[in-house]
Amino acid sequence: MVPHSIAFILYGVITTTSVPALFAAGIFPGILAGLSLIWPAYWILEHRGYMGEKRGSLKEVAAVFRDAFWGLLDPLVILGGINGGSSRLRKLPLLPCFIVVLLGLVVYRTLNLQSFCQILVDASISLVLPTVALGGLYSWAGATLGVMEKVAGSLLHVCLQPGVVLLHVNVLIFIAGML
C-alpha cells in the first residue's frame, strides 16, 4: 500500500468514516492533480519542439514488438516467480540478469563470450572499487579520530557479558552499514 492509502484507512478508522467513500472522494482531486501536472509538461514539450518522431505504422510496431517479444517476457517471469513462490526474494534479482544474458547469447546473438567477459569485469570493478574505497575511508577516519577505541572502551565499560557485547557490536555494524 502507498502511504496515502494508509492515511485514508487510518482516518477512516479513527473517525468511523467509510474507507471506500474516502477513496471515492479522492478520485476527482487525484485526476485534477494528475492533469495539472500533465498539461504544463505537454505544453512545454510541444512549444519547445521536444515531441520526438511520429509514430510508426502498425506494421512497424508489430515488427518491433516481434523483435522485443522475449525481452518483454522478463517482467512476467519476475512477477511469476514472486507470486508463484518458485523464487525466493533474495535470489530474484539474479533471474532477470540470467534471462538477459541468455537472450543476448542465444536468442538475439548480440552478445559473444568476449564481450560477456568484459561486461563481467566492468561490473565487478564498478561494484567492488567504490565499496573498498569507502570502507578504507571509514576505517582511516575512525582510526585517525580515535572513534574505534572510544566505542570499544565504552562497550567494555558498559557491560562485560559476551552476548550483550555482541548485540551492541551488531547494532553498531548495522548503523555503520547504513552510512
Image (cartoon, rainbow, N blue to C red):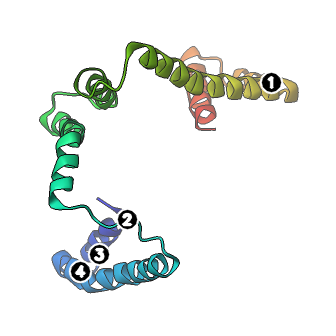
Bin the neighbour count of mark 4 within 10 Å (Cα to Cα): few under 14, some 14-19, many 20 and up: some
Residue beneath the point at 28% across and 65% down:
55
Rounded to the nearest angstrom, the CA distance separating label 1 from label 4 is 54 Å
For mark 3, give the secondary structure.
helix
Residue beneath the point at 35% across and 69% down:
4
Q: Earlier in the sequence, mark 1 or mark 3?
A: 3
Q: Which residue is mark 4?
A: 22
Q: Quadrant of residue 116?
A: top left
Q: Earlier in the sequence, mark 2 or mark 4?
A: 4
Rounded to the nearest angstrom, the CA distance separating label 2 from label 4 is 42 Å
Q: Which residue is mark 1?
A: 140
Query: Disc 3 or disc 4, which is closer to the eye?
Result: 4
Q: Earlier in the sequence, mark 3 or mark 2?
A: 3
For mark 1, give the secondary structure.
helix
Q: Earlier in the sequence, mark 1 or mark 4?
A: 4
Q: Which kind of residue does numbered mark 3 sit on?
A: Ile
For mark 4, give the secondary structure.
helix
Rounded to the nearest angstrom, the CA distance separating label 1 from label 3 is 52 Å
Bin the neighbour count of mark 2 within 10 Å (Cα to Cα): few under 14, some 14-19, many 20 and up: few
For mark 2, give the secondary structure.
loop
**Residue 162 sits above or below residue 42 on the image:** above
- Identify which residue, 2 or 124, lies in the foreground: 124
